[in-house]
């Protein structure tokens, strides 16, 4: 993976210490450790009103602690729906004989149809993120010509691989996610606009 990608991943709270130039993209991706969920730049402040209501007194008395608690809550491992994206690292090999996924897309989409959009010698994938939005799965082709900065593709469970969208290369794709500082800025602007400073 390119240095710029590693730097972006680190800024998003990812440990990249196990990444190595001698590994494939999939091996490197599986070696990442995400310490938190990711929120994209178009995130719609899900749950912030409720968090504010539950912590109104703290917001009035100590905003610094309020925002520290808010970040700990939103960037922790929880089951609440806040529109976040989740790191994934599972392989999907629907055209590889003897794989657990072989034939899973049969009757829905043909390999040659996927090849119209996806670059790579074999149509074998790794899911890199899952989201509650549309599309809800993001994949990279394991044989993408650029293993240091592969193209990311989006597809949704409603039309799994029947509709595939090119989301550009990984470096550009990662720009869609906010750092904790960017997240806090969005929330702060929202709360100050709604409830005052």
Image (spheres, grey):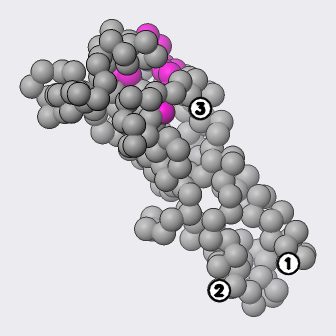
| In this rendering, position of residue 190 left or right of residue 70 | right
Q: Position of residue 73 (x, y in %)?
A: 57, 71
Instruction: Give, as a single range, the part of the protein colored magenta.
Output: 141-154
Residue 23 in the image, given as x and y percentages of width and height: 34, 22
Question: Could you tell me which residue is drawn at 64 percent across and 39 percent down?
Answer: 176
Residue at which label 3 appears: 173
Dot 1 or dot 3, earlier in sequence: 3
Residues at marks 1 and 3 touching, judged by CB atoms closer than 8 Å: no
Residue at disc 3, secondary structure:
helix
Q: Residues within 10 Å of mark 3 (few under 14, many from 20)?
A: some
Asked if residue 28 lies left or right of residue 91, the reply is right
Extreme residue in the left direction: 98
Q: Please tell me the numbered disc located at residue 177.
A: none
> Which residue is tagged 2?
54
Q: Is residue 7 magenta?
A: no
Q: Residues within 10 Å of mark 1 (few under 14, many from 20)?
A: few
**What residue sits right under mark 1 in the picture?**
195
The number of callouts visible is: 3
Name the chief secondary structure element in magenta: loop
The correct choice, above or below, for 35 with respect to 156 in the image is: below
Name which quarter of the figure residue 18 lies in: top left
Marks 1/3: CA–CA distance = 33 Å
Q: CA distance from mark 2 to mark 1?
A: 14 Å
Q: Residue at x 16, y 28 (%)?
A: 102
């Amino acid at each position: 993976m390119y240095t710029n990608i590693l730097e972006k991943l680190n800024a998003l709270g990812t440990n990249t210490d196990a990444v190595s130039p001698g590994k494939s993209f999939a091996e490197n991706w599986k070696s990442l450790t995400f310490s938190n969920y990711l929120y994209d730049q178009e995130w719609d402040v899900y749950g912030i009103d409720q968090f504010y209501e539950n912590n109104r007194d703290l917001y009035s008395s100590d905003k610094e602690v309020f925002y520290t608690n808010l970040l700990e809550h939103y960037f922790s491992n929880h089951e609440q729906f806040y529109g976040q994206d989740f790191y994934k690292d599972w392989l999907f090999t629907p055209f590889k004989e003897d794989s657990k996924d072989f034939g899973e897309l049969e009757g829905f989409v043909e390999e040659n149809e996927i090849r119209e959009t996806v670059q790579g010698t074999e149509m074998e994938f790794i899911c890199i993120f899952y989201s509650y939005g549309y599309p809800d799965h993001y994949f990279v082709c394991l044989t993408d010509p650029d293993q240091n900065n592969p193209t990311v593709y989006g597809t949704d469970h409603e039309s799994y691989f029947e509709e595939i969208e090119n989301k550009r290369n990984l470096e550009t794709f990662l720009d869609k996610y906010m750092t904790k500082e960017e997240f806090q800025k969005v929330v702060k602007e929202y709360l100050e606009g709604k409830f005052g400073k």
